[in-house]
Amino acid sequence: MSSLSASHILEVAGMGVFHDGSTQGVGVLTKEVSASQEESLWRLLAEHRLAGMFWQGLKNSGAEAQLRPQLRQELALGLREEQLRLARLELAFAHATAALAERGVPIIACKGIVLAKRYYPTRGLRRMHDLDFWLLDSKTEACTLALQAAGFAQRPDKATVHSLNFIDKAGNVLDVHFAMRLFQDRGIDLDTVSVPDTELGCRVFVPEAMVAHLVNHLLGHAASQGALLCWFVDIALVLQRRDVDLSLVRRLLNDEGSWEAFLRMLRSFVELGWVKPRWDIEPQIESARPIMWDGLVRQRRRIAWAGWAGKLRLAKSVMLRRAQHPPYPGLRDWMWQPVDWLYESSGVFVGTGSLLKRREHD
């Protein structure tokens, strides 16, 4: 896509969730966008779960008329579907938390449901697939019985050594995690980094712990699966809170370059207009290397087809014309691979702050 880069898309999406933001991306859309470009745009929005935010950003800036009616309709319908999906998940969440509270099983809710209800300005902008709970003690049997009573069936084939998986009749998926290794491996009690939320009916992480967890989650998945652009929006929205203590965030983050990667995120958030530089570490933020958003998009498209086995799967998928497949990389995605590797995977340019570098403890 030649006239609309990933940074432009993020600028428009940011207009949908932040009070302030760059309008350059919206300005690009005032020019004529061809049908082929709209197809590429829609694909990227779907890949990175930005469609609802992007549509809201266009509406907030009064630029939605610049798209063809078909794409406007698809974006509006997509947002409506996400609103309905969130309503179903909220109902399932309420049933689960009530059942767990009745049996005295303390939990912390995190990620999607908390972000959607506590940080995003409008329902449906944060796309969700499942619910995530963290147990505060080892009452796994009581937890299982409570969730089964609430209509959730256990799925042993989806369980791991660190979590249980459940699903209800409506298809809502719930992951119950036994431990938050990011904190507990270093002796940090989850009670000290969480607070009760009376409306949600459970505990939630304080903003600093939420930021640390989201950064750790992003870095842990990026090297093997690629980074979703919506994950950066999550982090920036939590950072908008005026009381976020970055010194505490730093203490809660893992070593191995997590803080350096976080500084790069901060610089890029400031450049996008998502957050205002109000901390006493502005020199560190300004000296951090900015994120190359297009490189992350290219990496996400290549990652599913990495290695010789991946190339064979790619060739087979194309020849068989399979309808369901990960996003296909284009020629430019492959041509840029050496540059992207140097910039984000090797650590040559950004050292330990590389976003796609494999880390032992993420």
Image: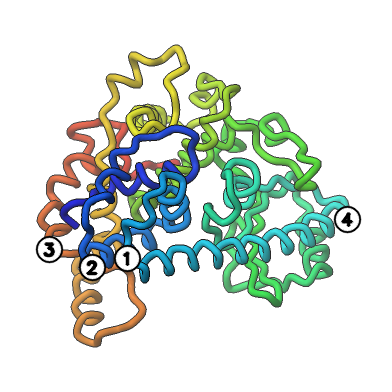
Residue at mark 4: 103
Front-lying residue, 54 or 70: 70
Q: Residue at x 37, y 28 (%)?
A: 270
Mark 2 touching mark 1, by CB under 8 A? Answer: yes
Mark 1 touching mark 4, by CB under 8 A? Answer: no
**Quarter where residue 7 is shown:** top left
The residue type indicated by label 4 comes to Arg
Tell me the element at label 1. Answer: loop
Residue at mark 3: 331
Give left or right: position of 55 versus 140: left
Tell me the element at label 2. Answer: helix
The residue type indicated by label 3 comes to Leu
Mark 3 touching mark 1, by CB under 8 A? Answer: no
Q: CA distance from mark 2 to mark 3?
A: 20 Å
Q: In front of the other: label 2 or label 4? A: 2
Residue at mark 2: 35
Q: CA distance from mark 4 to mark 3?
A: 56 Å
Which labelled disc corresponds to residue 68? 1
Q: CA distance from mark 2 to mark 1?
A: 8 Å
